[in-house]
Image (tube, helix red, strand yellow):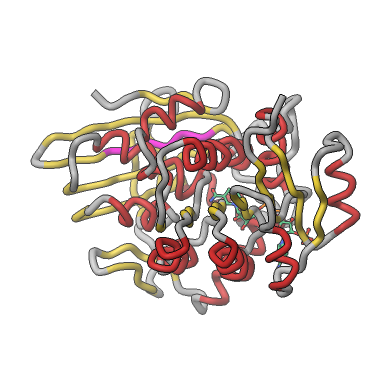
Amino acid sequence: MPIEHRVAVYGAYGHTGRFVVAELRRRGWGMVLSGRDETKLRALSVPDPGARVLPAAITDPGTLDELMVGVDAVINCAGPFAFTQEPLIEAAIRAGVHYLDVAAEPDIVERAIRHHADAVAAGVVVSPANAFYGGLGDLIASASAREWTSVDDVRIAYWLSSWIPTPGTLATIDTASTRRQGQRLVWTPAGLELRSDEAPAGRWEFPGPIGTQEVTQDFVTADAVTILHHLPVTRLQECMSIEALNDLGQLDGPGPLAVDERGRSAQRFMVDVQVAKGGVLRRSTAVGRDIYAVSGPLVVEAAARLLDGPPRTGVITAGAMAEPSAFLDALAPDHLQWSRAA
Ligand SMILES: NC(=O)c1ccc[n+]([C@@H]2O[C@H](COP(=O)([O-])OP(=O)(O)OC[C@H]3O[C@@H](n4cnc5c(N)ncnc54)[C@H](OP(=O)(O)O)[C@@H]3O)[C@@H](O)[C@H]2O)c1
């Protein structure tokens, strides 16, 4: 069978990178596996004799250029993205290759958006944050907004049954905290702001069986940037269940424990999204298992939509790809279930 697409995966042997590689393998796409550790890359490539292995330091533009040769897109899974995103976006633009990532840091996703003009000039798409944070909320809000070209309110609440972080998540939180000098990021109509006060606490009524939960309000995720990139919004609020945040406080551990044949953990999630315009409220909710695992098929579906759809250029986030509801349908029911807003 001819190979449909060939994709480079940077950070391929990381926890999330492995879910991306598994999805590419399932689709039978050609792969170039990359990252900084050759031994881990070679071990990962064993079941795929056709996969190319190319070790590359993120600080080595020459090897990153080599990584782009003969591929249709590059998927960056190596975080903190504060360090890996710029060199890979620049290499992709130099080579005329589409760039996608799973970045979670809102300010870094905002930085990626500044590459819009360069991406248009190079005839490629730069698509940051195609993952649980940044991708899923964007898709659900966009699918709910449907024909509305702007909305008054977007409210997103996340519930996680637990949150056992990976080393990459911890390093990303740590780097972001240093970058922000311990302050928290807040969404305002004028853009993201840093504040040193405590985030307000509140309650959110999730659909059953989760029900009412204590939440932290003003919990800014990459969704706050990806949605705003293509959908004018007057007010945006994100909330996160406090129980999940408390788990993040228990930092030392082996990371998420695989409990099924796909390598997913037992973690459950719910993303509850409300969009409102002119007094009309639309609510849509997604549930699923393992926020890292769902990010793999999500970013690969985004790549498929870019590579198989009509030619597009510039910065495009998941929710702005054609038919966000069809995008979500493509992930269901294997990777999530979602209720369509009435
Ligand atoms: N938006 C979302 O919802 C979402 C979902 C999943 C993951 N993520 C993000 O994805 C990133 C990775 O998470 P993970 O769970 O896969 O973590 P992980 O299992 O710890 O993997 C991190 C990967 O990044 C690589 N890496 C880190 N810094 C690097 C650098 N400077 N140069 C080259 N490679 C580097 C690591 O390589 P080494 O092992 O060689 O250090 C490893 O392959 C994190 O930033 C996380 O926040 C976001």
Quadrant where the N terminus sits is top right
Residue at far left of view: 278
Q: Nearer the viewer, residue 76 or 243?
A: 76
Please give left or right for residue 38 compared with residue 142 in the image.
right
The answer to whether residue 249 is visible is yes
Please give left or right for residue 268 compared with residue 8 in the image.
left
Q: Residue shown at 27%/46% (left/top)?
A: 154
Q: Is residue 302 above or below residue 180?
A: above
Q: Residue shown at 49%/36% (left/top)?
A: 308
Please give left or right for residue 92 compared with residue 260 in the image.
left
Please give left or right for residue 199 compared with residue 230 in the image.
right
Residue 4 percent location from the top left of the image: 63, 33
Region rendered in magenta: 269-274
Quadrant for ligand 1 reads: bottom right
The answer to whether residue 216 is visible is no
Q: Nearer the viewer, residue 78 or 279?
A: 78
Quadrant where the C terminus sits is top left
Q: Residue shown at 49%/55% (left/top)?
A: 128
Task: Please tell me in which quadrant of the rendered image residue 325 appears.
Answer: top left
Check residue 183 for magenta coloring.
Answer: no
Task: Please tell me in which quadrant of the rendered image residue 264 appears.
Answer: top right
Residue 288 percent location from the top left of the image: 53, 29
Q: Residue shown at 77%/64% (left/top)?
A: 56
Residue 26 percent location from the top left of the image: 69, 28
Q: Label the magenta part by its dominant secondary structure.
A: strand
